[in-house]
Image (spheres, rainbow, N blue to C red):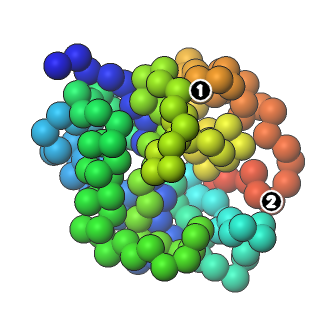
Amino acid sequence: MAKEKAVLALGSNLGDRGDHLRRAAQELGQVPGIKLVKLSPLVESLAVTPAGIDESRPKYLNAVLLVETSLKPKELLAACRLVESDHGRVRVEKWGSRTLDVDIITYGTTLKTGKELTLPHPRAYQRSFVLVPWSLADPDAILPGHGSVAELVDQLPENPQSKVWIME
């Protein structure tokens, strides 16, 4: 089966955040049909809720994982959710604190809108905690429908929500 390049965003703000991200990357790379290509440097960001920045919540550690996969998008999503569950992820509140979050940002150049999965991720172009590590891992990356990831980073507004700190 043909392999497709995919970009996964990893985030954690509970427990040993770095360990969750590194182990999740390794575990995803062990799933049949997923080949780990590169893990970005880690970045730290403030917690974002539907109401905006919440500095009372623990900060997030984020990374982007570049993979090649022979899995279909929904199969890849199922693998991501299984790894989240293995790390104690519980879906209680939308945009709540979590041990691990794994989002599919892109699946090749696929453009798809669905109830369970929209590709590319509908808010990726606005999220510094996705764009910055992605641009560090792949300076020539393109976000389908939005253009150069590096240019999107340069266009981020100067506000607390777009602030990230490179950790490594």
Vertical order, 70 against 165 (above or below): above
- Which quadrant holds the N terminus? top left
- Tell me: residue 126, above or below residue 12: above
The three-letter code of the residue at mark 1 reads Leu
Task: From the image, state whether disc 1 or disc 2 is nearer to you.
Answer: 1
Looking at the image, which residue is at 32% across and 22% down?
A: 4
Q: Is residue 155 above or below residue 77?
A: above
**Spot occupied by residue 36 in the image (x, y as percentages of width and height):** 27, 35
Gap in angstroms between the C-alphas marked 1 and 2: 23 Å
Q: Nearer the viewer, residue 34 or 117?
A: 117
Looking at marks 1 and 2 on the same chain, the residue that comes earlier in the sequence is marked by 1
Q: Amino acid at mark 2?
A: Pro
In the rendered image, residue 74, in percent from the top left (x then y), is placed at 33, 42
Label 1 sits on residue: 143
- Look at the picture and state if 21 lies above or below 134: below
At horizontal 29% and vertical 27% (from top left) the residue drawn is 68
- Furthest-bottom residue in this view: 56
* Residue at image point 51% right, 43% down: 114
- Depth check, front residue: 112 or 162: 112
| Residue 22: image location, x then y, percent | 32, 55
Q: Is residue 41 visible?
A: no
Considering the numbered disc 1 on the image, is that residue within a helix, a strand or a loop? strand
What kind of element bears circle 2?
A: helix
Q: Which residue is mark 2?
A: 160
Residue 132's disc is none
The image quadrant that residue 8 belongs to is top left
Q: Is residue 34 or residue 162 the one in the foreground?
A: 34
Q: Residues within 10 Å of mark 2 (few under 14, many from 20)?
A: few
Place residue 60 in its image quadrant.
bottom right
* Residue lying furthest front: 115
